[in-house]
Image (cartoon, helix red, strand yellow):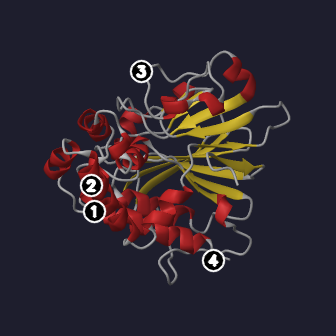
Amino acid sequence: MNEKFAELGSPRRIWAVAAVHGDVERLSTFHDHIASRFSVRDRLVYLGNYLGVESRNNAAVMEEILLFRSALMCKIGVEASDIVYLRGPAEEAWQRLLRLQFAPLPHQMLEKLLASGVESYLRLYGVSVTDTRSVARAGSLAITRWTNQLRALQRNSLGHEKLMFTMRRAAFTNPGADGKRALFVPASFDPARSLDDQGESLWWTAAPFKVTGRALAAYGRIVRGFDSVNGGADLDDAAVTLDGGCGRGGPLVCGCFSQTGKLLELVVTGGRGSLESIPYEREAANDFHMQDAEERVVSAPPVTLAEPRFAVNA
């Protein structure tokens, strides 16, 4: 198994979910929408940043993700590898926080991690940011004891540690007939580097998100789930941003893609029970503008739910 990247193979459809940022209502509405539609040879890829710094529902988001995974696994033919979780900037920051004792300047590293959203994980486990800052200025032994306590909090929360261990840096399909893959990343991509050499570019970079140079020869489309400047969803031909501002006043956006990266459908979730599913047959960025997404979201027909909540026709 590739411990860095998820290999999606040659799927029929790929459902890619943008950053959730703690908005459990929008996430659960999306789950209800695709529960009965997800089928064998489909893939579900969460693009990271699951929790929100200001959210009070972070524990509910984690529970929703874990429950929906269990529900999909009840479908005949669905494998664990069909459901992929990427590490967003916040998840990468949390992993680095657990190794804070090895940082040359722990207090400076902590500020970088807080800027990347690690506070959402501290909130999840009831840890004070003030106390965290105090510990970061203590010696390495004190920091080690503290990070061990954080690991214990994660381990004692059912399913959390296992979920973290399954998270990957990026996901990609097999090449299509044109030799190109579809690539899914958390926040960015440096087109001048190979995927193996991306390093921090997948999470933190000041460069614009574009597909140029040799990346154009390798990837038919690169899709990301988080935009640090909150610029809204962008359906550019080669570089797609699905971040509609979920958890920050905007909708949750999901794109349904083919193996080669063609956008087949756009699902925009504006709240519990409010959803718009848009077939996307034309490959043009200007056909859809996310700035009016909240006004255009319409009430979806009620979803018929089984026990448990998700209607997952086997």
Residue at figure coordinates x 57%, y 36% from the top left: 223
- State the image coordinates of residue 119 (x, y, percent, origin top left): 26, 48
Report whether 278 appears left or right of 292: right
| The N terminus, quarter of image | bottom right
Residue at mark 2 to residue at mark 4: CA–CA distance: 32 Å
* Residue type beneath disc 2: Leu
Mark 4 and mark 1 residues within 8 Å of each other at the beta carbon: no
Mark 3 and mark 1 residues within 8 Å of each other at the beta carbon: no
Mark 2 and mark 1 residues within 8 Å of each other at the beta carbon: yes
| The C terminus, quarter of image | bottom right
Residue at figure coordinates x 28%, y 38% from the top left: 106
Residue at mark 3 to residue at mark 1: CA–CA distance: 31 Å
**Front residue (pair 289, 125):** 125
Give the mark nearest the N terminus, 4 or 1.
4
Residue at mark 4 to residue at mark 1: CA–CA distance: 30 Å
Mark 3, residue position: 206
Mark 2, residue position: 122
Helix, strand or loop at disc 4?
A: loop
Mark 1, residue position: 125
Helix, strand or loop at disc 3?
A: loop
**Front residue (pair 182, 133):** 133
Mark 4, residue position: 74
Give the mark nearest the N terminus, 4 or 3.
4
Report whether 148 appears left or right of 135: right
**Label 2 environment density (alpha carbons within 10 Å; few <14, some 14–19, many ≥20):** some
Report whether 130 appears left or right of 227: left
Residue at mark 2 to residue at mark 1: CA–CA distance: 5 Å
* Residue type beneath disc 1: Tyr
Residue at mark 4 to residue at mark 3: CA–CA distance: 42 Å
- Determine if residue 244 is in view: yes
